[in-house]
Image (cartoon, rainbow, N blue to C red):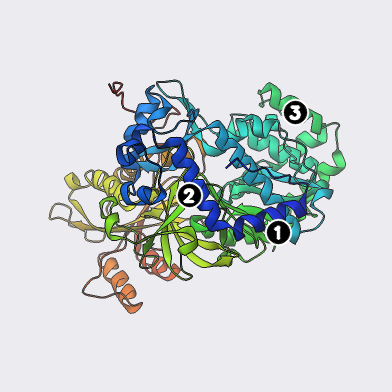
Amino acid sequence: MVVLSCDPNDLEGSMRLIEELTTNAGRIQEEVLQEILERNSGTEYLHGFLHGRSRLDQFKEEVPVVDYDQVKPYIDRLANGEPSQIISTEPILELLTSSGTSGGQSKMMPSTAEELDRKTFFYNILIPVMNRYVEGLEEGKSMYLLFVKPEISTPSGLPARPVLTSYYKSGHFRNRPFNRYNVFTSPDEVILCSDAKQSMFCQLLCGLVQRTDVLRVGAVFASAFLRAVKFLEDHWRELCANIRSGRVSDWIPDGPCREAVSRVLLRPDPALADLIEAECGRPESWGGIVRRLWPRTKYVDVIVTGSMAQYIPLLEFYGGGLPLVSTMYGSSECYLGINLRPLDRPADVSYTLLPNMAYFEFMQVDDERTYECASDCTGDLKVVDLVDVEVGRYYELVVTTFTGLYRYRVGDILMVTGFHNAAPQFRFVHRRNVVLSVDTDKTNEEDLLRAVTRAKLLLEPLGWLLTEYTSYADTASIPGHYVLFWELKATAASGDEDGLALDRAVMEDCCSAVESCLDAVYRRCRKRDLSIGPLEIRVVRTGAFDVLMDYCVSRGSSVNQYKTPRCIKPPEAIRLLDEVVVGRFFSTKVPFWEPYEMDVKAIPPSS
């Protein structure tokens, strides 16, 4: 099966292609798996199970469903210089760092040159779908705020970088053909600027100068777009000064970035600066600021499903009622599905998986809460093909890719909401075992426990014991941050049952200790991206967690089987604990993180 192409300017042809793919989903899935096996059955990984054979039934019988722990040794070997043939006959050209982690470090997924062709097809086919619902997009521009992030070089010289950074730096993006339906306000040089602050400032500057051309705004994730709004709130006066003078601020040293912005900022425009100052300087709130600054905007294009749903109220506030559109569902492993009804409410968004992108299987789980099965219990779970899922059931996604992943558990829990032709449609429910997420971070219960266990040691010499804790992601402000509720018990040495005499410096050290133990993605978001604020610990009165238990039992939990939830989401539960807070403390240190930080063990080549 050759990689399909899609001309985004051919709206009717693109929609026919979607119909063909979804109508023939079963046949296309078989062809995808057959091609993957014909290419790669002789690789070291698959040969160990299939012994060179490429029959589809043997694949499902002999190749196990695996987690990253089973894949990581092969990734480490690639990173240390062993040939791609251990997992793929196509050369592995880079490793894509995932927001998921293993042992506190970013997972890394193999990628090939051909996979960039699939991503290009995927991006191109999104555009005709939007044009079915929103007319006139060719008459203006898109203010999409896109950014690159740091990359590293593995011991073998393979680059390791986030999937979006990989695509934006590729020739597929930089040399893309003109598409009248998707013209960006941001020059490529600004998008590719490695300094996040310079890039943000210049992208907003370009978007403001071209405000009357902007028909849609957005970023990949809701958190990134809100971060841009906060940046605008902090820097609008300087942005207006640049527009008024027709000159970019001196603190922007990136040469290509300055030159590209100068081509947009052609001349001084005092009238535009006055208009923006009048809108941003209103004494009332910033409600509806997006619609006021970019009056022709038709919608906000951001992912608002999964953990990003927590940002919907803020997006609605700043957007002034603009539709929130989630167009796509993808991952570092591969790109997956598109939203064929993009103007649906965020709560109703479903994605249709495109059967040509990879081979998809689904591991059935009982409901949205049953997702913590260990990787060695997959033999007892029912695994079904893409076209055999059932409406209303919950599944964990399993992928076999062209790039060397075989029956790999992505970790996403999906619910089947219906079908488009023969292709199922899924609502993203959550990540497996993720309890906290503000941006691209994904902290699971095990990581949180390890961090809290380390931090509480600071209290014990002072006569305090941690008796209970829970957490939530506070996204009421920008950037959002982690909040931990701690209930403490005083020993005879302290004599203070309610924590009123806690030492502030020690509690701030506890906050910092928790952060230092969280994974590399969290620490990158804190230190470099500034997309997560300082972690907060709120100490509650003795007995607060008994009140929380009463609340949970009143909502249907069994008192005999009750376990304190390590993350709480209902506003009422958060309010109950907030009412009995006796102390609030924030981390005062930025946790350590460096771009080269990863976990690739030096492994001698296999004989």
Q: Amino acid at mark 2?
A: Tyr
Query: Of helix, strand and loop, which one carries label 3?
Result: helix
Q: Secondary structure at mark 2?
A: strand
Residue at 34% from the left image edge and 49% from the top image edge: 65
Q: Residues within 10 Å of mark 3 (few under 14, many from 20)?
A: some
Q: Which mark is residue 51?
A: none
The answer to which image quadrant residue 116 occupies is top right
Residue pointed to by mark 3: 260
Q: For marks 2 and 1, give the CA distance.
A: 43 Å
Q: How many marks?
A: 3
One can see residue 329 in this view: yes
Query: What is the crowding at mark 2: few (fewer than 14 residues within 10 Å), some, or many (at least 20)?
Result: many
Placement of the N terminus among the 4 image quadrants = top right
Label 1: element kind: loop
Left of 311 or right of it: where is 319? right
* Residue type highlighted by circle 1: Gly
Where, by quadrant of the figure, is residue 361 drawn? bottom left
Task: Tell me how far mark 1 sits from mark 3, CA to CA.
Answer: 30 Å
User: Residue 359's mark?
Assistant: 2
Sort mark 1 into few (<14), some (14-19) or many (20+) by Cα contacts within 10 Å.
Answer: some
